[in-house]
Image (cartoon, rainbow, N blue to C red):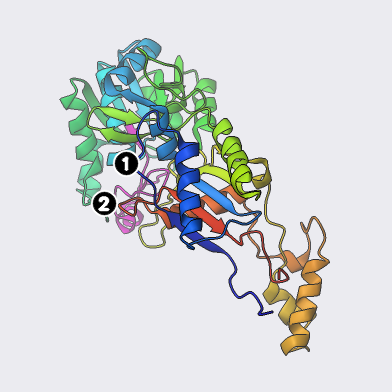
């Protein structure tokens, strides 16, 4: 019997274009069975089926319009002067939400963080900031002061001047806008005590700071569209967080109520193949681009829904450490056998064990979601489902 040579393999699965009301369990299971009958994959126990959040939300019809957003903002803020703080700079993610917010207020104080937004999109040259004498931890800049110091900066990848872009979007929607730059949430309270915090991963801390500082109304993007407006879609947990532009006037929200989908998909594959496959819904991967310094994760979580077998973190030994430290005097088959025996006999919890130092202490769903996001891409690959094999294997697996 030949030794198995492949470890982890990630494959994009081509699927039909998904529309509202489509039965994802039936469609995806049919695609998997077709791939298996074609000899393109063989379904095995502990494989992972990852479904992009986009097709889940689309099948649910989980959309809202900018008019829905405007109404929700107006109702919850009073619709007068509202501080909109710490948004990311994104045409796809935030710009359409900004239009809805602008339609729901009379005046917006738009407060941008600098030198970059929460996920790493720069709005200025970092070297210029170092040379300016400005303290980003404390200094608040007006738009005029910012332009005088730093001029116009265009995003490295999109070529956009997001400051001008956002300013124009708000005024085109009929609201007055004043733009300031600050990194302390409380700075907005010099302008208004009604605040919409638009940061993603730090949102609760920001809200707590504002409430402690005396803000009258404090909301986050997770508080907007967290219930239906005029029969719209919604997300009870995340509101507008995780949303994407669908059309010029419509937003696709993060999927909701999809635990039954992943559990049902697992049961369907078991019924068809007899194999126990783990299933997850994934959004953005949690990784950082080394060139643009952009952290990919603009969704509130990598995986909002997953089967129980994907809860936890890896429990792995570092093969390099074993080879150099524990078995530095061995080579060839003797070294291989010694390492395999160590893996087979490893403790159930390796936290604090030097032989696990340097392994990745992240949630399985974050690691698998990042792998899936890189496999499926965000363009025209047409593979909104990713099938991963061998992820739970190790060097001792035959």
Residue wearing tag 1:
89
Earlier-in-chain disc, 1 versus 2? 1
Q: What residue range appears in magenta?
A: 111-136
Above or below 11: residue 74: above
Above or below 346: residue 251: above
Q: Calculate the distance from the C-alpha at mark 1 to the C-alpha at mark 2.
A: 9 Å
Helix, strand or loop at label 2? It is loop
Within 10 angstroms of label 2, few (less than 14), some, or many (20 or more) residues?
Answer: some
Q: Main secondary structure of the magenta part?
A: loop
Q: In the rendered structure, are the residues bearing label 1 and label 2 in contact, judged by CB atoms less than 8 Å apart?
A: yes
Q: Residue at x 58, y 59 (%)?
A: 389
Q: Residue at x 33, y 42 (%)?
A: 17
Residue 277, magenta (yes or no): no
- Rendered image: mark on residue 155: 2
Which corner quadrant holds the N terminus?
Answer: bottom right
Q: Nearer the viewer, residue 195 or 252?
A: 252
153 relative to 296 in the view: left or right: left
Residue 117 % position (x, y): 38, 43
Within 10 angstroms of label 1, few (less than 14), some, or many (20 or more) residues?
Answer: many
- Rendered image: mark on residue 41: none
Residue 395 % position (x, y): 69, 71
Above or below 92: residue 367: below
Residue 190 found in image quarter: top left
182 relative to 105 in the view: left or right: right
Helix, strand or loop at label 1? It is loop
Q: Nearer the viewer, residue 337 or 203?
A: 337
């Amino acid at each position: 019997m030949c030794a198995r040579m492949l470890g982890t393999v990630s494959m994009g699965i081509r699927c039909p274009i998904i529309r509202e009301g489509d039965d994802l369990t039936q469609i995806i299971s049919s695609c998997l069975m077709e791939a298996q009958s074609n000899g393109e994959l063989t379904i095995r126990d502990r494989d992972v089926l990852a479904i992009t959040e986009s097709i889940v939300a689309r099948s649910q019809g989980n959309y809202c319009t900018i008019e829905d957003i405007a109404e929700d903002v107006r109702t919850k803020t009073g619709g007068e002067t509202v501080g909109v703080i710490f948004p990311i700079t994104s045409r796809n993610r935030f710009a359409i939400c900004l239009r809805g917010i602008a339609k729901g207020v009379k005046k917006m104080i738009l407060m941008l963080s600098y030198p970059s937004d929460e996920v790493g999109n720069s709005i200025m040259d970092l070297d210029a900031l170092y040379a300016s004498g400005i303290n980003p931890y404390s200094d608040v800049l007006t738009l005029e002061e910012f332009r005088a110091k730093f001029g116009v900066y265009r995003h490295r990848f999109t070529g956009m001047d997001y400051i001008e872009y956002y300013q124009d979007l708000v005024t085109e929607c009929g609201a007055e806008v004043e733009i300031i730059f600050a990194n302390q949430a409380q700075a907005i309270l010099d302008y208004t005590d009604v605040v919409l915090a638009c940061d993603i991963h730090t949102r609760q801390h920001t809200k707590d700071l504002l409430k402690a500082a005396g803000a009258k109304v404090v909301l986050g993007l997770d508080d907007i569209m967290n219930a239906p407006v005029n029969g719209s879609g919604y997300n009870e947990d995340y509101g507008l967080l995780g949303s994407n532009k669908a059309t010029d006037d419509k937003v696709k929200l993060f999927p909701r109520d999809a635990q039954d989908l992943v559990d049902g998909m697992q049961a369907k594959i078991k019924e068809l193949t007899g194999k126990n496959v783990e299933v997850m819904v994934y959004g953005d991967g949690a990784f950082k681009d080394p060139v643009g310094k952009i952290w990919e994760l603009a969704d509130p979580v990598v995986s909002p829904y997953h089967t129980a077998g994907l809860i936890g973190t890896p429990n792995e030994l570092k093969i390099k450490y074993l080879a150099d430290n524990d078995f530095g005097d061995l080579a060839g088959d003797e070294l291989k056998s010694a390492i395999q025996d160590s893996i087979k006999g490893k403790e159930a919890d390796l936290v604090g064990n030097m032989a696990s130092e340097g392994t990745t202490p992240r949630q399985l769903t974050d690691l698998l979601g990042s792998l899936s996001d890189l496999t499926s891409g965000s363009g025209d690959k047409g593979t909104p489902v990713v099938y991963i094999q061998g992820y739970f294997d190790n060097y001792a697996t035959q």
